[in-house]
Amino acid sequence: MAGRIPALVLGGSGYVAGELLRLISLHPHLELAGVMSDSQAGQPLRHAFPHLQGGAGSQRFAAREELLGRFSPGRLALFSAAPHGASAELIAGMIRHGEAAGSELTIVDVSADFRFADADAYAKVYRHPHGAPELLDRFACALPEHLPGTPRPFVGHPGCFSTAMLLAAVPLLSLGLAGSDLHAVGITGSTGSGRSPGSGTHHPERHSNLYAYQPLRHRHAPEVVGICARLTGARPALHFVPHSGPFARGIYLTLQTRLARPAGEDTVREQIAGFYAGQPFVEVVDGMPRIKAVAGSNYANIGVSCDGEQLAVMVVIDNLVKGAAGGAMQWMNRLLGWPEETGLTAPALGWT
Ligand SMILES: NC(=O)c1ccc[n+]([C@@H]2O[C@H](COP(=O)([O-])OP(=O)(O)OC[C@H]3O[C@@H](n4cnc5c(N)ncnc54)[C@H](OP(=O)(O)O)[C@@H]3O)[C@@H](O)[C@H]2O)c1
């Protein structure tokens, strides 16, 4: 379609890639130019994503070499939803190829590969060397609500649990409300684990069940602390206990801290609401937020409870949208000069 910017997606048949394809099909200024898949090359997109109806699923997955043939001179939007450890190297190859093809690439990576400021910090958490350390200072990593403008040409989007934690932690730290320790308990839906089945995601295990995993050891905690430090100058002690929940989409996260100074609930709620004033996707709600109010959408709802000394902030998001593909699209919109909410304002599903 004339005037649209071609979009390429890496991470082919994965859940986040599927969500990116859905969002691209709804976007008024982007046009899908190719989706890379090793396992599904040549298959129609609907083979992996039967829900991409109405023409969105009629294109075919492309092998890597075929995808390289889709590069064109001029602006090109590249989303990576490849696994961490693979994404950085893949992106580096795409940048080299794009330069040779005369493409002007704008890149948002949803994997963990560009969430740390330096390669050593990445290697310490992920236990393998970074795939493209020379690219680290070309990527910013933050939520669009927390970093104005376009400070770097490319963006690494924070992870899904990280999105929920940052939505609670960054205002508390920026406003001087939080004590030195942050305690976060989060519950994620099964799509958070990706498409490959595992013992923790198998239906009989997951359905009607609830269990913690990697308590106090999850890789998102150091990512969130690093991002908070870069954004606010504060380096909190973050104690994070993630859980697997019995639903497919959504995250419910509660972040608790002792207030830095005593304050009433209304005051704290107003301060957090003021912090997010003008942000189209984040709302501080009365009462407690609920996953079904945001599932399937790019919206985040925040609830606040405070007894004068202890503060609890409850955040709900859709892990695949606000926590991944939607947040990435928000950044892509900004990097390409469009209103941030372009193609993203569809309301939540209500009943999933
Ligand atoms: N799920 C979430 O809620 C969520 C939220 C935030 C961020 N993320 C991040 O987003 C990325 C995708 O997550 P996901 O849940 O969609 O995972 P997923 O369902 O496991 O999909 C990842 C896909 O990447 C492709 N792939 C596998 N190995 C690859 C390699 N070496 N090089 C290139 N592509 C490869 C595979 O597709 P093909 O076989 O078709 O090539 C695979 O299906 C991950 O980095 C994840 O950490 C996920």
Image: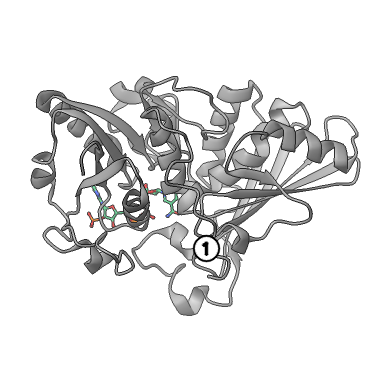
Instruction: Tell me residue 19's x, y (percent).
Output: 37, 55
Instruction: Tell me residue 85's x, y (percent).
Output: 31, 41
Q: Is residue 303 left or right of residue 18?
A: right
Say which element carries label 1: loop
Q: Is residue 21 left or right of residue 292?
A: left
Q: Is residue 75 left or right of residue 301?
A: left
Q: Nearer the viewer, residue 203 or 290?
A: 290
> Is residue 258 visible in the rendered structure shown here?
no
Q: Quadrant of residue 163?
A: top right
Residue furthest to the bottom in view is: 204
Q: Residues within 10 Å of mark 1 (few under 14, many from 20)?
A: many
Q: Is residue 199 above or below residue 12?
A: below
Q: Is residue 305 left or right of residue 296?
A: right
Q: Is mark 1 within 8 Å of ligand 1?
A: yes
How is the rendered protein coloured?
one colour
Q: Quadrant of residue 332?
A: top left
The N terminus, quarter of image: top left
Question: For the residue marked with disc 1, what is the amino acid?
Answer: Gly
* Image mark count: 1
- Which residue is drawn at the image coordinates 47% and 67% (left, top)? 200
- Which residue is drawn at the image coordinates 48% and 40% (left, top)? 341
Instruction: Tell me residue 288's x, y (percent).
Output: 75, 57
Instruction: Tell me residue 245's x, y (percent).
Output: 57, 66
> Is residue 270 visible in the rendered structure shown here?
yes
Q: Which residue is mark 1?
A: 189
Q: Is residue 333 above or below residue 19?
A: above
- Which residue is drawn at the image coordinates 38% and 42% (left, top)? 111
